[in-house]
Amino acid sequence: MSTDLVVPVTVAVITGYAFYKKTDIFSVFIQGAGKGLSSAFSILPALCFLMTAIGMLRQSGIIEMLTGFIRPFAEATGFPPEVLPLALLRPFSGSGALGYYEELCANLETGSFAEKVASVLMGGSETTFYTVAVYYGAIGIKKGRNTVPAALFADISAAVLSVFAVNLFLQK
């Protein structure tokens, strides 16, 4: 089956099953849409805070200051220093990280070590704070305990292992 048919076939199967079970599709859809909207409204304050914090971090120069502080360690360990801002932005903002990634790729030589590391890092890391804000905001969790430290450890691991993976699999 062609991948172009997956969505239409899925919709047809669900609709057919609903007719078979004599379910009022429209009322179920409206009920689900209402729950979706209430979830969206419940996470809105967390998202507004997160977007404001990201804008402040980028405009204040903190990212550049942290990059300068970490640069000697990165160079000593083989991590490309030009990818550091991406590693710092990624846990906070997927769109901010994507924007920096596109800018980075435009300024780097195609197929360079730094570009490969940035690509693996983008695919192997998560927007930790966004994800925590959305999911915890949706279900009303106030205390995350070990979630953020564990997720940040995973992000650091993704940065370190992106260099390892590129050296192991993508370098000639």
Image (cartoon, rainbow, N blue to C red):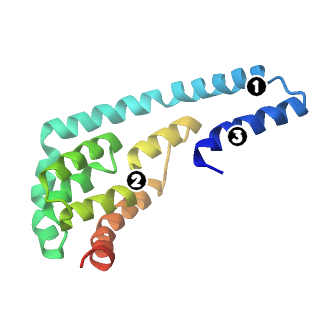
Q: Give the amino acid type for the residue marked by disc 1 in the picture.
A: Val
Circle nearer the viewer, 3 or 2: 3
Residue 69 image point, x, y percent: 11, 59
Q: Give the amino acid type for the residue marked by disc 2 in the picture.
A: Glu
Which residue is found at the position 21% from the left and 40% from the top?
Answer: 57
Q: Which residue is mark 1?
A: 28
Pointer 1 and pointer 2: residues touching (CB < 8 Å)?
Answer: no
Which residue is found at the position 40% from the left and 63% from the top?
Answer: 154
Q: Nearer the viewer, residue 60 or 3?
A: 3
Horizontal relation, residue 94 to residue 18: left or right? left
Q: Give the amino acid type for the residue marked by disc 3 in the picture.
A: Val
Horizontal relation, residue 143 to residue 85: left or right? right
Q: Which residue is mark 2?
A: 126
Q: Is residue 153 above or below residue 135?
A: below
Indicate the secondary structure of the residue bearing disc 3. helix
The image quarter in which residue 94 lies: top left
Horizontal relation, residue 10 to residue 44: left or right? right
Pointer 3 and pointer 1: residues touching (CB < 8 Å)?
Answer: no
Which residue is found at the position 20% from the left and 52% from the top?
Answer: 105
The image quarter in which residue 151 lies: bottom left
Q: Nearer the viewer, residue 43 or 37?
A: 37
Residue 26 image point, x, y percent: 75, 20
Near mark 2 (Cα within 10 A), the count class, few <14, some 14-19 or many ≥20, is many
